Image: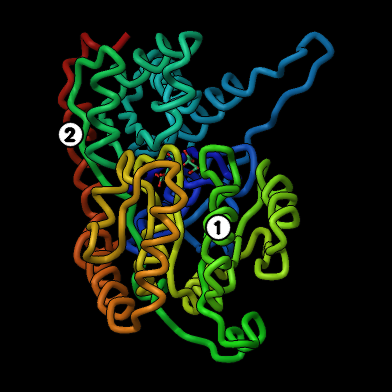
Amino acid sequence: MKIGITCYPVYGGSGVVATELGIALAARGHEIHFISYALPFRLGKLAPNIFFHEVDVTSYPLFEYPPYSLTLTSKMASIAKHEKLDVLHVHYAIPHATSAVIARQILEQQGIRIPVVTTLHGTDITIVGRDPSFAPVVTYSINQSDGVTAVSEYLRKETLSNFEIDRNISVIPNFIDTNRFKRQESSSLKQKLCPNCEKVLVHVSNFRPVKNAKQVVEIMHRLKQDNYSLKLLLVGDGPDRVPAEHLARELGIYDDILFMGKQEAVQDILSIADVFVMPSGSETFGLAALEAMACGVPVVASNIGGLPELVDHGENGFLCPLGNVDAFAERIRQIVSSDTLQQKMGDAARQKAKDYFDNEHVIPLYEKLYEKTLVATQNQPNSQLV
Ligand code: GMT
């Protein structure tokens, strides 16, 4: 199939999922056209059947706010027509689903039919989408899509209970290439980062307030009070990085933490991790936790959102009450003080990633959905075309 994919190309779970999906689909023989304002950061080298179409953000003195959604719409319509796309798959409702629905209408006027598949990721529903200034357009765009997916059962239910949705939403979870994300311990990396053989806690995020990065520092502080030999690796960057650095200095534990910033080879860092910490205030799925699990790392996470669908409490990690720093510290203490428990939970984490979220299981679900929407669109009577 020829598939157009639109996503936010910058750091963020939805962009990662969309990009990895495009790469995986291309590896299965599909032709992929990314349509976005920048090259998706995880794309790396382009394969012969992966194309990128950049959307200009038109500037004109009259436009105090350049209408990106409209240039995106035009680009989608043009690429779909000239590249003869079979389906447009957009990630994140605002504005991508809206642009795709209008692009489809433009093409219908030219006698061209193309189904729109929308994947809901999280903040497009749980935070931004609920804002009354966006809610009507989110509702419309979801209802007008030919196929809609949510990344967890939690997000599916949230969408249905917060918006007036009159169509089916399928759950297709985040996925992972377990051949790439696997534990490949590098003793030299461990030696360099943790010269005193400390146990390693890892947190990976974009440091948006919803990720509660400062709580990770507080948790580390609690653990250090008990004289545990620990190192905390904080990977990623964003608004809460500097406040987290300040807090670490204030608490006198700055030297026990490495603020590593954005990193490409996350799997190498996860491979030397003993526990992954995710105290998020909202998380529809928790892709970063899945990456850790695939690398055999037990996860200690907030008991919220879609995280209970990923982390089985007591099996492959622990779920803690939101914001309860003491509970997080206690659970981490439990894991790092028992090699047997850590090994058992790490193995169970890797097994869950392989059994439920491997590319091999999840990518075909998208392929089936594309085929279904394509058949339904082709079977529409001509009178339904404008
Ligand atoms: O997590 C982020 O900050 C980015 C955000 C996004 O919308 O790009 O990620 C969401 O989508 C990911 C991929 O489906 C999920 O794994 C994340 O849990 C979800 N983030 C939140 O719900 C906060």
- The answer to which of 235 and 342 lies nearer the viewer is 342
Q: Residue at the location (28% across, 63% down)?
A: 358
Q: Quadrant of residue 93?
A: top left
Q: Residue at the location (34% across, 29% down)?
A: 116
Residue 28 image position (x, y, % from top left) = 32, 62
- The answer to which of 243 and 6 lies nearer the viewer is 243
Residue 153 image position (x, y, % from top left) = 22, 38
Q: Quadrant of residue 350?
A: bottom left
Which residue is disc 1 drawn over? 42
Q: Secondary structure at mark 1?
A: loop
Residue 241 image position (x, y, % from top left) = 68, 49
In this rendering, is residue 259 above or below 327?
below
Residue occupying the far right of the picture:
61
Which residue is disc 2 drawn over? 375
**Left or right: 37 in relation to 5:** right
Whether label 1 touches label 2, CB < 8 Å? no
